[in-house]
Amino acid sequence: MIRKALIALALVLVIGATTAYVARDSLLGWAIRQRIQQGPDQAFATDHNGIKVLICGTGTPEVSSARAQACTLVAAGGKLFLFDVGDGALRSLSASRIPVNDLEQVFVTHFHSDHFNDLGALINAGWIWGRETPLTVAGPQGLAHVMAGFAEAYALDEGYRSANMPHLAERRAIAGAVAREIAFGDGQRSVRVYDRGGVTIDAVLVAHEPVRPALGYVLRYKGRKLFISGDTKVSPVNLPAMQGADMVVHESYAGHMVRRAIPEMRKLGMEFDARVAERTIPYHADNLALARQAQAAGVKHLVLTHLIPNPDNAVVRAMYTEGMSELYKGPITVAEDGMVLTF
């Protein structure tokens, strides 16, 4: 009985292998079609009468294979707006099938490298893969200098590709990037930087000294308000941007955990790491102070990103927001790369 079953199985395998060999061209064509069709998904930008947020990077300057650096994508009014483009942002956006060539505009918060590492790659990819309009990139003063540096870094690449594919040389003016430096008048802490199709975006000065200027952004659409903090310590200057926000995507620093870790670092001889940790405390947003400010500002939903330390296991994740719910009564979300939130 077993022998007959084995013979039957062998026959099935032989027939299957023979069929696959004979039909290999058809199978290959099918596989190619499936791969080609797995392109960007245009649906994310569809106007759903509200605001949609993709957390495309929750990381920090710390190297991580699991998290992209700072990146937040917002869909509103049928348009896509990208806030910060840290290392890994393009891979993260691709994993979520976002059509990056359709970006309406990019906004940079400040010039720590983990907030713009992938900007050059984003501009270059748009040129190679068919972006139809120049990409406007807005950010603090100094942006033009940064983008000129990217242009210089990619100059040889552009020359080689244009020599091989002449149509790319013709597309440079179409698919390039335009730097828009955001300026503030004397005493001004907020300035409108986008107003189209019912969507408004205001750049606001935040507190991330010695980084000056450092920006956050307030996006409004159909009566809804979103604040993206960039990097900042908790400060009264941020309160107007947070006031009454339906959602705040805010950098997050579990100071209670870092302070516990510093003496342990020193016991292990990790003096350099301990000094770095001590120096990061004053200019990032301590979770407990952030919870108090969110409550005072009437924030409806607090989303934590730029997570320090990385909550990469269940224990750290459980400790990460310790004490926050006692100070802030709204929902708290510890973001993960690829997370989508709507309101």
Image: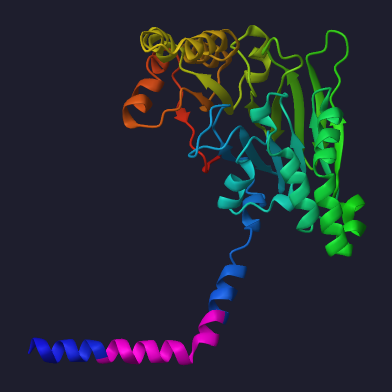
Residue at the far front: name it.
269
Q: Residue 233 occupies which quadrant of the picture?
A: top right
**Residue 328 image point, x, y percent:** 45, 16
Judge by depth and name the residue closer to the eye, 244 or 166: 166
Relative depth, front residue between 160 and 67: 160
Q: Is residue 47 left or right of residue 281?
A: right
Q: Is residue 328 above or below residue 311?
A: above
Q: Position of residue 19 (x, y in %)?
A: 41, 91
Q: Nearer the viewer, residue 114 or 33?
A: 114
Closer to us: 164 or 46: 164
| Quadrant housing residue 314 | top left
Write the start and end of the magenta stretch as one range.
11-28
Where the C terminus falls, by quadrant? top right
Residue at position x 74%, y 51% from top?
125
Q: Quadrant of the N terminus?
A: bottom left
Residue 343 visible in the displayed image: no
Q: Residue at x 56, y 9 (%)?
A: 279
From the viewer's perspective, is residue 73 above or below residue 215? below
Task: Name the magenta segment's main secondary structure.
Answer: helix
User: Measured along the vertical axis of the image, is residue 326 above or below residue 19?
Assistant: above
**Residue 23 in magenta?**
yes
Q: Is residue 40 left or right of residue 312?
A: right
Residue 275 belongs to magenta span: no
The x, y position of residue 232, in whole percent, is 63, 16
Q: Quadrant of residue 141?
A: top right
Q: Is residue 137 visible?
A: yes
Coloring applied to the structure: rainbow
Residue 284, percent across and down? 57, 14
